Image (cartoon, rainbow, N blue to C red):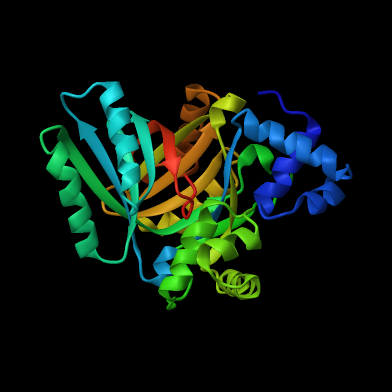
Amino acid sequence: MKLNSFDLKILHELEKDATLSLKELSVVIRRSKQFVAYRLERMENEGLILGYSAVVDVTAIGFFCFRIYIDFQHMTSLQTEQFVKEMKRHSEVVQAYLIRGHWDAALYVVLPSLMHFRKLWDKILLNYKKEIKEHSVFTYAPIYNLSKPFLNRSSLRTVRSIGVADAQKVSSEDWELIQLYSQNVRVSLIELSKKLNRSRYAIKKRLKELRESKIISGTNVDLDPQKLDQKFYTIALSLESFKIIDSLYDFCSMQRSIYQINRIIGGDDFEIKVMVKSKQELVSLIDKIKLKFPGKIRDDNYFSFQPVYSRGIVPY
C-alpha cells in the first residue's frame, strides 16, 4: 500500500496517542477534519490499520503473562492455522501467531493464577496432545514497547512498558473496562457506557486514573506489516553475562528496526522484535549487535511471525 506524507503524519500522531480525535489530528497535520477522516478510513478499509489498542501492565494488577511456543507434528499448515484461530475462543489467549522457524505457533496468555494456566493448558491438550511434538513456556518481565521505527520522525521514541508499575488492586468492573477499552481505544464513551452500564463521567474518570497509575501505559496503532512490504521477526539472545543488560537495552532502543525489547524468564535471556524489509536486513542487525558486544552473545536464533488475532492489552 502506497502512503503519502499526510498518511505517515497521521500514523505518526496515532502511534504517539491512538485516542486523538479527528479534530485533534486535523489541527496537528493542518488539514481539514474531512480530509483526515478520508485518509484514515482508506487505511482501515485497505487493511493497513488493523485496530487501536491499549498497552496494559497486567502484571501490576495481579495477572501472569506467558507466551507458549508450540511445534506440531502430523499437521499441515492449514491445520496449524485452524488451531491458532480456534484459540480465540479462550478468553485468556490475548494473542495468537503463526511462526516460520523452529516453532509453528505461539500463544500469548494472561491469567490471574498458575492454576488458571494449568486448566487452560489441559483444555488445549485435550484436543491436541498427539499433535503437539514440543512446547516451551516463557514469561516476560519487563516488556518495553517502542514506537514503530518507520513512524518515528525524531530521535525520541515513545516507550510503553509492561512489568514495571507498582502492584495495585482493581475491581472486576475495572477489569471489564480494561478488557473492552484495550480492544479499541477510539471507542466512544457513549458506547462504553452502554456496554458497561456505567455513566460516561465514571468511565472517563476511571480511565484517567488507570493511565496516571500506568496500568494503562499507552496506546498502539496495530498495522499489517505486509501492506508496507515489511516483515515481523523475533530475535532471541542467550548472554554470557548479565552485566551487559542495560547497555544492550540502550543499544537496541536506538536501532530503528527494533520496536519491542523483552527480558525473558525461562529459555533465552533477551528477546527483540523487529520490523524489516528483508531477511538480509535482519541478519545485518544481528551482526551489528554481536559486533557491539563481542564475546558477550552466547547464542542467537530468529523466526518470522504473523499475528492471526489480538485482543489488545499487549502489542504484538
- The residue at the point 50 percent across, 42 percent down is 292
> With 239 as the anchor, is 229 left or right in this view?
right
Q: Quadrant of residue 102?
A: top left
- The residue at the point 30 percent across, 30 percent down is 82
- Return the x and y of residue 307 as percentages of the image width and height: 43, 36
Residue 62 can be seen in this image: yes
- Return the x and y of residue 186 as percentages of the image width and height: 64, 53
> Above or below — where is 162 with respect to 257?
below
> With 198 as the anchor, is 293 left or right in this view?
left
- Return the x and y of residue 257 as percentages of the image width and height: 57, 37
Query: Could you say which is closer to the camera, residue 60 or residue 277?
Result: 60
Residue 55 can be seen in this image: no
> With 192 as the anchor, is 101 left or right in this view?
left
Q: Quadrant of residue 192?
A: bottom right
Query: Could you say which is closer to the camera, residue 277 or residue 286?
Result: 277
- The residue at the point 45 percent across, 34 percent down is 233
Outermost bottom residue: 169
Q: How many numbered markers are drawn?
A: 0
> Above or below — where is 223 with respect to 1?
below
Q: Quadrant of residue 105?
A: top left
- The residue at the point 48 percent across, 37 percent down is 291
> If the image is split into quadrants, where does the N terminus sit?
top right
